[in-house]
Image (cartoon, rainbow, N blue to C red):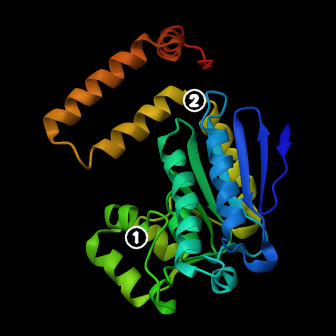
Amino acid sequence: MTETTYEAISFEQSGAIAQITLNRPDAANGMNDTMTRELADAARRCDTAGTKVVVLTGAGRFFCAGGDLKSFADAPDRGRFIKGVADDLHQAISSFARMDAVLITVVNGTAAGAGFSLGVAGDLVLAAESATFTMAYTKVGLSPDGSSTYYLPRLVGLRRAQELMLTNRTLSAAEAQEWGLVSEVVAADQLQARAAELAEQVAAGSAGSNGAVKSLLASSFKNGLEDQLAAESRFIAARANSADGREGVDAFLAKRRAEFA
């Protein structure tokens, strides 16, 4: 296992699985400039062939309560400071979306504001039964960031996205799952074990195949049918010629478990 020292997050790599933990529990894991800068750096570290899964969670009772408003208020130029925080967060989210590795977000507690945005940006989203989700941006006179205006309309539809953002409605974990924001709800005392189990399951698969799934699903929102069919043909042909594709087919025909790179 390799561990990198950061100030506001922790990062560990064990084989093909990376673990990122938002680590400001005394500040409800609020995002300041240090945290988002480090998160962007950690995300870039995960965008490699050696990483198949990234597990992202929070330390303590909160997943992330959003932006650290105290650090915003203390900045000489609030707008410039907040833009820097948002830009680094956006770089992290872009890396997570672009990489072949599957991002599993493990929402262990309250996810508010940018914490909500980051939590639902996972490819797979686990939530503790006690977790809650709320936008909360307009409550403090701000507007959404962290990719929520991109992902929420696609996940829950425009009307529900409007409700979440304009009324700051709080969703329970069960409601978030019903709305399509969460993949699975788990008892709090079983959350980390389930996350580890899921990470191992995904890591046993083919990184290239998972990356193809991510790319194809992302392009489906901008492509017409013919363009999407063409993309599917290109991807499956490339996968068939890859080492993992050959191994997967050969293993299936030999009735043995595939050993992917």
Q: Inspect the image, locate mark 2, and give the three-letter code of the amino acid beneath it.
A: Gly
Q: Please give the name of the residue rendered at 27% of the width and 77% of the height, measured from the top-left corner.
A: 159
Q: Please give the name of the residue rendered at 38% of the width and 17% of the height, measured from the top-left corner.
A: 238
Question: Is residue 209 or residue 68 the one in the foreground?
Answer: 68
Q: Secondary structure at mark 1?
A: helix
User: Residue 36 at x, y = what percent?
Assistant: 64, 61
Left or right of 215, for residue 225: left
Residue at the outermost front position:
76
Quarter in which the N terminus is drawn: top right
Between the C-alphas of marks 2 and 1, the distance is 28 Å
Q: Inspect the image, locate mark 1, and give the three-letter code of the amino acid beneath it.
A: Trp
**Which comes before the other along the chain, label 2 or label 1?**
1
Instruction: In the rendered view, tell whether residue 120 sits above or below residue 248.
Output: below
Mark 2 sits on what residue?
A: 205
User: Residue 98 at x, y = what percent?
Assistant: 48, 41
Residue 92: tell me if it is visible: yes
Mark 2: give few (<14), some (14-19) or many (20+) Cα within 10 Å.
some
Left or right of 7, for residue 194: left
Q: Quadrant of residue 144?
A: bottom left
Residue 198: tell me if it is visible: no
Q: Please give the name of the residue rendered at 53% of the width and 17% of the height, measured from the top-left corner.
A: 244
Tell me the tag on residue 179. Answer: 1
User: Residue 162 at x, y = what percent?
Assistant: 32, 80
Instruction: In the rendered view, tell whether residue 209 sits above or below residue 70.
Output: above
Tell me the tag on residue 16. Answer: none
